[in-house]
Amino acid sequence: MRPTDKQTVKIGLIAPLTGPGAVFGNSIDRAIKLAQQDTKNTKFTYKVIVEDDGTNPTQSASAAQKLINVDKVQVLISMTSGTGNAVKPIATSNKVPNICICSDISVANADYNFTNLILPDDEAGGWLAAAQKQGVHSIAILHQNQQGINAIINSIKKLASQYKISIVYEDQWDPTVRDFKTIITKARASKPDVFYMVAFPPTEDIIGQELKDLGVKNISSSAGFGISAKPELFDGLWYNDANVSDISFRTRFEEQFPTIRFNVRSAPFGYDSFMMIVNSFESGTDLNAYLSNLTTFDGKAGKITKEAGTRNFHSAPGFWIIKNGKSEPLNVK
């Protein structure tokens, strides 16, 4: 149901403000606050109600039920693939659109659900192309078992041969694992040019410390180092992730929220998703229909596109390097 003029549009945000995904969650929360500041002279007032799910899918589902049934939100923005998959059936059954900032594009295979991030094939292809230019011929894949991470890894394995890169070792672990010495030893025995490692904290930081202690420096990632709780572990290492087309957006974020680390994988997409929602309501178009028919959007993440008949918004990846514990843009030639 659409609000009448002068009423409030309620937007539910499900994000990890605590726990291993807190870098994601706090960054998207503040980015949406910037979007609210930029929403002026509108027909409606836009109120965001935030629920912290700690990247726990059970909490994600409870948060969605509460936001829809108690707070009466008209739309959801969610974060991470685990959350998106938990929220998906609830959004569909209640006919409440859900925009998930996540890598698992299957989150959008049900009506009322959309994703807004880099497509796994684009992210994997971008990393492989950059690695090939640097003379990489072999990689050892080390990764956490998680839907979004698995989607990226599957694309790496599917596309690697096109870039003449061989996968000489692969190991996957569950989030409860805390000792990686055996995995690292086996991976080193395969003598890869690069250790391609993708994980969430705290396992990312544990294996990062163990790799550092063992003198392993040839490490890279997709979407990895920028979310680390200890990014200094990866100083001097490059990775690919989302892009920020407007650097002044990051500058403004950091000036206004100096204690919150800007995260390129959540902040621009949170801002853009909020603005898509505002544009729909201001235009008088049903939100599900608006998002379904929208094919291009110029946002903070760059040019966002969506093929007709799909629900996966996506944009081009960018490249980053950790310098003094902070993610900085990297020009990969």
Image: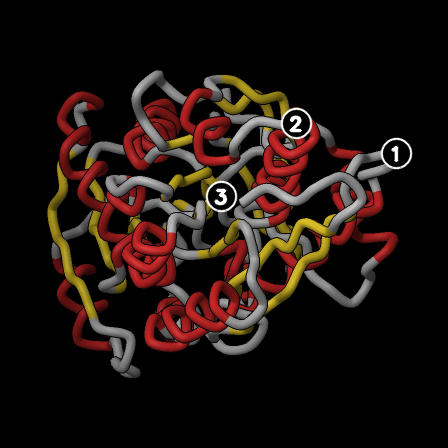
- The label number, if any, that marks residue 238 in the structure image: 3
**Whether label 3 touches label 1, CB < 8 Å:** no
Element under disc 3: strand
> Mark 1 or mark 3, which is nearer the start of the sequence?
1
Q: Residue at x 62, y 41 (%)?
A: 268
Select label 1 or label 2 by which is in front. 1
**Image spot of residue 119 (x, y percent):** 35, 33
Residue 326 occupies quadrant = bottom right
Q: Say which element carries label 2.
A: loop
Where residue 21 sits: x, y (%)? 49, 67
Question: Of 142 and 306, which appears nearest the observer?
Answer: 306
Q: Which numbered disc, 3 or 1, marks the residue closer to the eye?
A: 1
Display colour scheme: secondary structure
Task: Report helix, strand or loop for mark 1.
Answer: loop
Residue at point 87% right, 52% down?
255
Q: Measure the alpha-carbon separation of dots 3 and 1.
A: 42 Å
Q: What amino acid does circle 1 point to?
A: Asn
User: Residue 223's spot in the image, x, y percent?
Assistant: 44, 48
Residue hosting label 1: 41
Please give the residue where the numbered disc 2 appears in the rendered image. Answer: 245
**Residue 25 as seen in the image, left or right of residue 21:** right
Q: Residues within 10 Å of mark 1 (few under 14, many from 20)?
A: few
Which comes before the other along the chain, label 2 or label 3? Answer: 3
Query: Could you tell me how far apart the alpha carbons at marks 1 and 2 are, in whole angstroms?
Result: 25 Å
In the image, is residue 26 above or below residue 269?
below
Compared to residue 253, the image places residue 306 above or below, namely above
The x, y position of residue 113, in whole percent, is 36, 43
Residue at image position (36%, 67%) is 211
